[in-house]
Image (cartoon, rainbow, N blue to C red):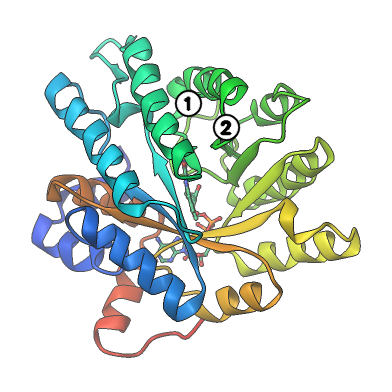
Amino acid sequence: MGAKEFVINLTPSPLVKVFAKPYVAGQGIESGINTAKKLWEEKKLHSTIDLLGEEIKEKEEIEKNVQIYLDLLDKLGKQEFASVSLKPTQLGVYRDSRGTIHGTDFCYENIKNIIEKAKSYNIHITIDMEDHPFTDLTLDMFKSLRNEFENVGTVLQARLFRTKQDILNLPTNKMCKIRTCIGIYKEPPEVALQNKNDMKDKLYEYMILLLERGHYPEIATHDEKLIERCIEYLDKHNIPKERYEFQMLMGVPREKTQKKIIERGNIMRLYVPFAEKWKYAVAYCKRRLAANPMMGAYVIKNLFGKTTGR
Ligand SMILES: Cc1cc2nc3c(=O)[nH]c(=O)nc-3n(C[C@H](O)[C@H](O)[C@H](O)COP(=O)(O)OP(=O)(O)OC[C@H]3O[C@@H](n4cnc5c(N)ncnc54)[C@H](O)[C@@H]3O)c2cc1C
Protein backbone atom coordinates (compact mmCIF):
# COMPACT_ATOMS: atom_id res chain seq x y z
CA MET A 1 0.00 0.00 0.00
CA GLY A 2 1.39 3.42 -0.96
CA ALA A 3 1.49 6.43 1.39
CA LYS A 4 -1.53 8.01 -0.38
CA GLU A 5 -3.68 4.87 0.05
CA PHE A 6 -2.49 4.56 3.66
CA VAL A 7 -3.62 8.08 4.53
CA ILE A 8 -6.93 7.63 2.72
CA ASN A 9 -7.59 4.36 4.54
CA LEU A 10 -7.11 6.19 7.81
CA THR A 11 -9.68 8.84 6.87
CA PRO A 12 -12.57 8.43 9.32
CA SER A 13 -15.83 7.15 7.81
CA PRO A 14 -17.92 10.23 8.79
CA LEU A 15 -15.50 12.40 6.80
CA VAL A 16 -15.66 10.03 3.84
CA LYS A 17 -19.46 10.34 4.14
CA VAL A 18 -19.10 14.07 3.40
CA PHE A 19 -16.93 13.28 0.36
CA ALA A 20 -19.41 10.60 -0.71
CA LYS A 21 -22.42 12.87 -0.95
CA PRO A 22 -22.08 13.99 -4.59
CA TYR A 23 -20.96 10.53 -5.73
CA VAL A 24 -23.57 8.29 -4.10
CA ALA A 25 -27.34 8.56 -4.65
CA GLY A 26 -28.11 7.56 -1.05
CA GLN A 27 -29.36 4.58 0.88
CA GLY A 28 -31.93 2.17 -0.54
CA ILE A 29 -33.33 1.35 -3.99
CA GLU A 30 -35.59 4.41 -4.05
CA SER A 31 -32.62 6.76 -3.77
CA GLY A 32 -31.05 5.21 -6.89
CA ILE A 33 -34.29 5.32 -8.87
CA ASN A 34 -35.25 8.83 -7.78
CA THR A 35 -31.80 10.19 -8.63
CA ALA A 36 -31.89 8.56 -12.06
CA LYS A 37 -35.40 9.92 -12.73
CA LYS A 38 -34.37 13.41 -11.70
CA LEU A 39 -31.25 13.33 -13.91
CA TRP A 40 -33.44 12.31 -16.83
CA GLU A 41 -36.27 14.76 -16.23
CA GLU A 42 -34.06 17.75 -15.51
CA LYS A 43 -31.05 17.15 -17.77
CA LYS A 44 -31.86 14.29 -20.15
CA LEU A 45 -28.97 12.34 -18.63
CA HIS A 46 -29.23 8.54 -18.79
CA SER A 47 -28.09 6.51 -15.78
CA THR A 48 -26.70 3.12 -14.95
CA ILE A 49 -27.82 2.28 -11.42
CA ASP A 50 -25.50 0.20 -9.25
CA LEU A 51 -25.83 -1.38 -5.82
CA LEU A 52 -22.59 -0.71 -3.93
CA GLY A 53 -20.84 -3.71 -2.41
CA GLU A 54 -18.02 -6.07 -3.35
CA GLU A 55 -15.91 -8.95 -2.08
CA ILE A 56 -18.90 -10.49 -0.30
CA LYS A 57 -18.49 -14.06 0.94
CA GLU A 58 -21.62 -14.71 3.03
CA LYS A 59 -24.26 -16.64 1.07
CA GLU A 60 -27.09 -14.90 2.90
CA GLU A 61 -25.81 -11.45 1.95
CA ILE A 62 -25.24 -12.51 -1.66
CA GLU A 63 -28.81 -13.80 -1.90
CA LYS A 64 -30.03 -10.54 -0.41
CA ASN A 65 -28.11 -8.64 -3.10
CA VAL A 66 -29.72 -10.72 -5.84
CA GLN A 67 -33.12 -9.87 -4.36
CA ILE A 68 -32.24 -6.16 -4.21
CA TYR A 69 -31.36 -6.23 -7.92
CA LEU A 70 -34.60 -8.08 -8.76
CA ASP A 71 -36.60 -5.53 -6.75
CA LEU A 72 -34.73 -2.68 -8.41
CA LEU A 73 -35.69 -4.03 -11.84
CA ASP A 74 -39.34 -4.48 -10.83
CA LYS A 75 -39.47 -0.94 -9.50
CA LEU A 76 -37.73 0.52 -12.56
CA GLY A 77 -39.97 -1.37 -14.97
CA LYS A 78 -40.05 -0.41 -18.65
CA GLN A 79 -38.48 3.00 -19.08
CA GLU A 80 -35.90 4.62 -21.33
CA PHE A 81 -33.48 6.35 -18.97
CA ALA A 82 -31.76 3.71 -16.84
CA SER A 83 -29.67 0.59 -17.23
CA VAL A 84 -28.19 -1.37 -14.31
CA SER A 85 -24.59 -2.27 -13.39
CA LEU A 86 -23.42 -5.07 -11.10
CA LYS A 87 -20.21 -6.72 -9.88
CA PRO A 88 -19.38 -10.45 -9.80
CA THR A 89 -17.90 -10.19 -6.27
CA GLN A 90 -21.17 -8.89 -4.86
CA LEU A 91 -23.09 -11.77 -6.42
CA GLY A 92 -21.22 -14.95 -5.54
CA VAL A 93 -17.59 -14.90 -6.62
CA TYR A 94 -14.89 -14.39 -4.00
CA ARG A 95 -11.20 -15.05 -3.48
CA ASP A 96 -9.80 -16.63 -0.34
CA SER A 97 -6.66 -15.54 1.51
CA ARG A 98 -4.51 -17.59 -0.91
CA GLY A 99 -6.06 -15.84 -3.90
CA THR A 100 -8.05 -18.88 -5.04
CA ILE A 101 -11.36 -17.90 -6.58
CA HIS A 102 -14.60 -19.62 -5.53
CA GLY A 103 -18.28 -19.43 -6.39
CA THR A 104 -18.15 -18.90 -10.16
CA ASP A 105 -21.14 -21.17 -10.96
CA PHE A 106 -23.26 -19.70 -8.16
CA CYS A 107 -22.42 -16.19 -9.38
CA TYR A 108 -23.22 -17.11 -12.97
CA GLU A 109 -26.68 -18.36 -12.00
CA ASN A 110 -27.34 -15.24 -9.92
CA ILE A 111 -26.33 -12.87 -12.74
CA LYS A 112 -28.31 -14.93 -15.24
CA ASN A 113 -31.46 -14.63 -13.10
CA ILE A 114 -30.99 -10.86 -12.93
CA ILE A 115 -30.47 -10.59 -16.70
CA GLU A 116 -33.52 -12.76 -17.37
CA LYS A 117 -35.71 -10.46 -15.27
CA ALA A 118 -34.12 -7.37 -16.86
CA LYS A 119 -34.90 -8.76 -20.31
CA SER A 120 -38.62 -8.73 -19.49
CA TYR A 121 -38.37 -4.95 -18.96
CA ASN A 122 -35.91 -4.34 -21.79
CA ILE A 123 -33.27 -3.15 -19.30
CA HIS A 124 -29.59 -3.47 -20.17
CA ILE A 125 -27.20 -4.98 -17.58
CA THR A 126 -23.48 -4.17 -17.47
CA ILE A 127 -21.15 -6.54 -15.65
CA ASP A 128 -18.53 -4.20 -14.14
CA MET A 129 -14.89 -5.24 -14.34
CA GLU A 130 -12.92 -5.69 -11.12
CA ASP A 131 -9.19 -6.23 -10.67
CA HIS A 132 -7.23 -8.49 -13.02
CA PRO A 133 -7.60 -11.86 -11.21
CA PHE A 134 -11.31 -11.58 -12.09
CA THR A 135 -10.92 -10.61 -15.77
CA ASP A 136 -11.03 -14.13 -17.26
CA LEU A 137 -14.04 -15.29 -15.32
CA THR A 138 -15.94 -12.04 -15.95
CA LEU A 139 -15.31 -12.25 -19.70
CA ASP A 140 -16.19 -15.96 -19.78
CA MET A 141 -19.45 -15.24 -17.97
CA PHE A 142 -20.19 -12.32 -20.27
CA LYS A 143 -19.56 -14.29 -23.47
CA SER A 144 -21.68 -17.20 -22.34
CA LEU A 145 -24.52 -14.89 -21.26
CA ARG A 146 -24.24 -12.84 -24.46
CA ASN A 147 -24.90 -16.03 -26.43
CA GLU A 148 -28.30 -16.20 -24.81
CA PHE A 149 -29.17 -12.56 -24.07
CA GLU A 150 -28.93 -9.29 -25.95
CA ASN A 151 -29.31 -7.12 -22.85
CA VAL A 152 -25.87 -7.76 -21.33
CA GLY A 153 -22.58 -5.94 -21.70
CA THR A 154 -19.32 -5.67 -19.81
CA VAL A 155 -16.25 -3.50 -19.28
CA LEU A 156 -12.70 -3.56 -20.64
CA GLN A 157 -9.89 -1.64 -18.95
CA ALA A 158 -7.45 0.13 -21.26
CA ARG A 159 -4.60 -0.19 -18.74
CA LEU A 160 -4.41 -4.00 -19.06
CA PHE A 161 -1.99 -5.37 -21.67
CA ARG A 162 -4.46 -8.12 -22.54
CA THR A 163 -7.31 -5.81 -23.59
CA LYS A 164 -6.60 -5.68 -27.34
CA GLN A 165 -6.72 -9.47 -27.50
CA ASP A 166 -9.87 -9.47 -25.35
CA ILE A 167 -11.54 -7.20 -27.93
CA LEU A 168 -10.44 -9.48 -30.76
CA ASN A 169 -11.87 -12.45 -28.82
CA LEU A 170 -15.35 -10.93 -28.45
CA PRO A 171 -18.06 -12.70 -30.47
CA THR A 172 -17.77 -11.57 -34.07
CA ASN A 173 -21.37 -12.23 -35.03
CA LYS A 174 -22.97 -10.28 -32.17
CA MET A 175 -22.76 -6.61 -31.29
CA CYS A 176 -21.38 -6.26 -27.76
CA LYS A 177 -21.85 -3.18 -25.61
CA ILE A 178 -18.46 -2.65 -23.99
CA ARG A 179 -17.74 0.11 -21.50
CA THR A 180 -14.18 1.16 -22.25
CA CYS A 181 -12.38 2.92 -19.39
CA ILE A 182 -8.83 3.17 -18.08
CA GLY A 183 -9.69 1.03 -15.01
CA ILE A 184 -9.81 2.13 -11.37
CA TYR A 185 -7.71 -0.67 -9.86
CA LYS A 186 -3.99 -0.20 -9.37
CA GLU A 187 -2.47 -3.12 -11.25
CA PRO A 188 1.12 -4.49 -11.22
CA PRO A 189 3.53 -3.61 -14.08
CA GLU A 190 3.55 -7.26 -15.21
CA VAL A 191 -0.06 -6.95 -16.40
CA ALA A 192 -0.78 -3.27 -16.92
CA LEU A 193 0.44 0.10 -18.14
CA GLN A 194 1.51 2.44 -15.36
CA ASN A 195 1.31 5.79 -17.15
CA LYS A 196 -2.12 7.46 -17.36
CA ASN A 197 -1.48 9.14 -20.73
CA ASP A 198 -0.55 5.76 -22.23
CA MET A 199 -3.77 4.28 -20.83
CA LYS A 200 -5.79 7.07 -22.43
CA ASP A 201 -4.09 6.55 -25.81
CA LYS A 202 -5.12 2.92 -25.53
CA LEU A 203 -8.69 3.86 -24.59
CA TYR A 204 -8.87 5.89 -27.83
CA GLU A 205 -7.35 3.03 -29.83
CA TYR A 206 -9.76 0.47 -28.29
CA MET A 207 -12.79 2.66 -28.99
CA ILE A 208 -11.80 2.54 -32.68
CA LEU A 209 -11.12 -1.20 -32.61
CA LEU A 210 -14.49 -1.89 -30.97
CA LEU A 211 -16.25 0.15 -33.66
CA GLU A 212 -14.31 -1.58 -36.44
CA ARG A 213 -15.29 -4.97 -35.01
CA GLY A 214 -18.99 -4.02 -35.02
CA HIS A 215 -19.34 -3.42 -31.29
CA TYR A 216 -20.76 -0.51 -29.27
CA PRO A 217 -18.16 1.35 -27.17
CA GLU A 218 -19.36 3.11 -24.05
CA ILE A 219 -16.65 5.73 -23.72
CA ALA A 220 -16.21 6.17 -19.96
CA THR A 221 -13.88 9.04 -19.08
CA HIS A 222 -13.94 12.51 -17.53
CA ASP A 223 -10.88 13.64 -19.47
CA GLU A 224 -12.17 16.43 -21.68
CA LYS A 225 -9.23 16.33 -24.09
CA LEU A 226 -9.74 12.62 -24.60
CA ILE A 227 -13.47 13.15 -25.14
CA GLU A 228 -12.68 15.82 -27.78
CA ARG A 229 -10.26 13.44 -29.46
CA CYS A 230 -12.87 10.67 -29.56
CA ILE A 231 -15.54 13.05 -30.91
CA GLU A 232 -13.18 14.23 -33.65
CA TYR A 233 -12.72 10.63 -34.80
CA LEU A 234 -16.43 9.77 -34.52
CA ASP A 235 -17.46 12.81 -36.56
CA LYS A 236 -14.71 12.47 -39.15
CA HIS A 237 -15.80 8.89 -39.81
CA ASN A 238 -19.53 9.67 -39.66
CA ILE A 239 -20.14 7.06 -36.99
CA PRO A 240 -23.90 6.97 -36.33
CA LYS A 241 -24.97 8.11 -32.85
CA GLU A 242 -26.61 4.71 -32.21
CA ARG A 243 -23.19 3.03 -32.38
CA TYR A 244 -21.68 4.47 -29.16
CA GLU A 245 -22.31 6.49 -26.02
CA PHE A 246 -20.43 8.45 -23.35
CA GLN A 247 -20.37 7.65 -19.65
CA MET A 248 -19.20 9.42 -16.49
CA LEU A 249 -19.49 8.95 -12.75
CA MET A 250 -22.22 10.90 -10.99
CA GLY A 251 -20.67 13.68 -8.92
CA VAL A 252 -17.68 14.48 -11.14
CA PRO A 253 -18.19 18.13 -12.14
CA ARG A 254 -18.50 17.97 -15.93
CA GLU A 255 -21.87 19.68 -16.49
CA LYS A 256 -20.86 21.70 -19.55
CA THR A 257 -19.28 18.74 -21.30
CA GLN A 258 -22.27 16.53 -20.51
CA LYS A 259 -24.66 19.17 -21.88
CA LYS A 260 -22.57 19.47 -25.04
CA ILE A 261 -22.61 15.71 -25.56
CA ILE A 262 -26.41 15.59 -25.13
CA GLU A 263 -26.86 18.53 -27.53
CA ARG A 264 -24.87 16.58 -30.13
CA GLY A 265 -27.60 13.92 -29.89
CA ASN A 266 -25.43 11.39 -28.05
CA ILE A 267 -26.39 9.33 -25.03
CA MET A 268 -24.60 10.65 -21.93
CA ARG A 269 -24.95 8.12 -19.11
CA LEU A 270 -24.00 8.59 -15.45
CA TYR A 271 -23.01 5.82 -13.06
CA VAL A 272 -25.46 6.20 -10.16
CA PRO A 273 -24.50 4.06 -7.15
CA PHE A 274 -26.71 3.55 -4.11
CA ALA A 275 -25.92 1.70 -0.90
CA GLU A 276 -27.86 -0.66 1.32
CA LYS A 277 -25.02 -0.67 3.84
CA TRP A 278 -23.07 2.49 4.40
CA LYS A 279 -19.72 0.65 4.71
CA TYR A 280 -19.86 -0.17 0.98
CA ALA A 281 -20.35 3.47 0.03
CA VAL A 282 -17.31 4.29 2.16
CA ALA A 283 -15.25 1.62 0.34
CA TYR A 284 -16.36 2.95 -3.08
CA CYS A 285 -15.46 6.53 -2.16
CA LYS A 286 -12.12 5.61 -0.60
CA ARG A 287 -11.13 3.86 -3.84
CA ARG A 288 -12.10 6.93 -5.85
CA LEU A 289 -10.34 9.25 -3.40
CA ALA A 290 -7.17 7.17 -3.81
CA ALA A 291 -7.43 7.43 -7.62
CA ASN A 292 -8.37 11.12 -7.53
CA PRO A 293 -7.20 12.97 -4.43
CA MET A 294 -8.59 16.11 -6.15
CA MET A 295 -12.06 14.69 -5.41
CA GLY A 296 -11.69 16.08 -1.88
CA ALA A 297 -10.96 19.55 -3.24
CA TYR A 298 -14.00 19.44 -5.55
CA VAL A 299 -16.25 18.42 -2.67
CA ILE A 300 -14.97 21.19 -0.43
CA LYS A 301 -15.44 23.73 -3.23
CA ASN A 302 -18.99 22.46 -3.80
CA LEU A 303 -19.77 22.63 -0.10
CA PHE A 304 -18.90 26.30 -0.18
CA GLY A 305 -20.93 26.89 -3.33
CA LYS A 306 -18.04 27.50 -5.72
CA THR A 307 -18.84 24.89 -8.34
CA THR A 308 -16.39 24.73 -11.18
CA GLY A 309 -19.21 24.65 -13.73
CA ARG A 310 -17.26 22.27 -15.92
C1 LIG B 1 -19.47 5.08 -15.96
C2 LIG B 1 -18.17 4.55 -15.45
C3 LIG B 1 -18.06 3.23 -15.09
C4 LIG B 1 -16.84 2.71 -14.68
N1 LIG B 1 -16.73 1.36 -14.45
C5 LIG B 1 -15.54 0.84 -14.13
C6 LIG B 1 -15.34 -0.57 -14.01
O1 LIG B 1 -16.26 -1.37 -14.19
N2 LIG B 1 -14.11 -1.02 -13.68
C7 LIG B 1 -13.06 -0.18 -13.48
O2 LIG B 1 -11.96 -0.65 -13.21
N3 LIG B 1 -13.20 1.16 -13.59
C8 LIG B 1 -14.41 1.68 -13.91
N4 LIG B 1 -14.54 3.04 -14.05
C9 LIG B 1 -13.46 3.94 -13.58
C10 LIG B 1 -12.54 4.36 -14.69
O3 LIG B 1 -11.82 3.25 -15.12
C11 LIG B 1 -11.56 5.45 -14.22
O4 LIG B 1 -10.91 5.07 -13.10
C12 LIG B 1 -12.21 6.78 -13.95
O5 LIG B 1 -13.20 7.04 -14.90
C13 LIG B 1 -11.16 7.90 -14.01
O6 LIG B 1 -10.51 7.91 -15.25
P1 LIG B 1 -10.60 9.08 -16.33
O7 LIG B 1 -10.54 8.49 -17.69
O8 LIG B 1 -11.76 9.94 -16.03
O9 LIG B 1 -9.23 9.83 -16.17
P2 LIG B 1 -8.62 10.67 -14.97
O10 LIG B 1 -7.32 11.21 -15.46
O11 LIG B 1 -8.60 9.87 -13.72
O12 LIG B 1 -9.64 11.84 -14.78
C14 LIG B 1 -9.79 12.88 -15.74
C15 LIG B 1 -10.18 14.13 -15.01
O13 LIG B 1 -11.41 13.91 -14.30
C16 LIG B 1 -11.24 14.15 -12.91
N5 LIG B 1 -11.87 13.08 -12.14
C17 LIG B 1 -11.89 11.77 -12.44
N6 LIG B 1 -12.55 11.07 -11.48
C18 LIG B 1 -12.93 11.99 -10.55
C19 LIG B 1 -13.63 11.92 -9.32
N7 LIG B 1 -14.08 10.77 -8.83
N8 LIG B 1 -13.84 13.10 -8.66
C20 LIG B 1 -13.41 14.28 -9.14
N9 LIG B 1 -12.73 14.39 -10.29
C21 LIG B 1 -12.51 13.28 -10.98
C22 LIG B 1 -9.73 14.08 -12.65
O14 LIG B 1 -9.35 14.92 -11.61
C23 LIG B 1 -9.15 14.55 -13.97
O15 LIG B 1 -9.07 15.96 -14.01
C24 LIG B 1 -15.73 3.57 -14.52
C25 LIG B 1 -15.84 4.92 -14.86
C26 LIG B 1 -17.03 5.42 -15.34
C27 LIG B 1 -17.09 6.85 -15.74
Q: Secondary structure at mark 2?
A: loop
Q: Position of residue 287 (x, y in %)?
A: 32, 48
Q: Residues within 10 Å of mark 2 (few under 14, many from 20)?
A: some
Q: Position of residue 182 (x, y in %)?
A: 56, 46
| Mark 2 beta carbon near ligand 1 (under 8 Å) | no
Q: Position of residue 27 (x, y in %)?
A: 17, 57
Q: Residues within 10 Å of mark 1 (few under 14, many from 20)?
A: some
Q: Secondary structure at mark 1?
A: helix
Residue in front for this viewpoint, 278 or 299: 278
Q: Earlier in the sequence, mark 2 or mark 1?
A: 1
x 36%, y 73%: residue = 38
Marks 2 & 1, CB-CB < 8 Å contact: yes
**Horizontal side, residue 291 vs residue 284: left or right:** right
**Horizontal side, residue 271 vs residue 7: left or right:** right
Mark 2 residue type: Ala
* Mark 2 to mark 1 CA distance (whole Å): 9 Å
Viewer can see residue 128: no
Residue 132 numbered mark, or none: 1
Residue in front for this viewpoint, 123 or 222: 123
x 43%, y 80%: residue = 42
Q: Which residue is mark 2?
A: 192
**Horizontal side, residue 294 vs residue 175: left or right:** left
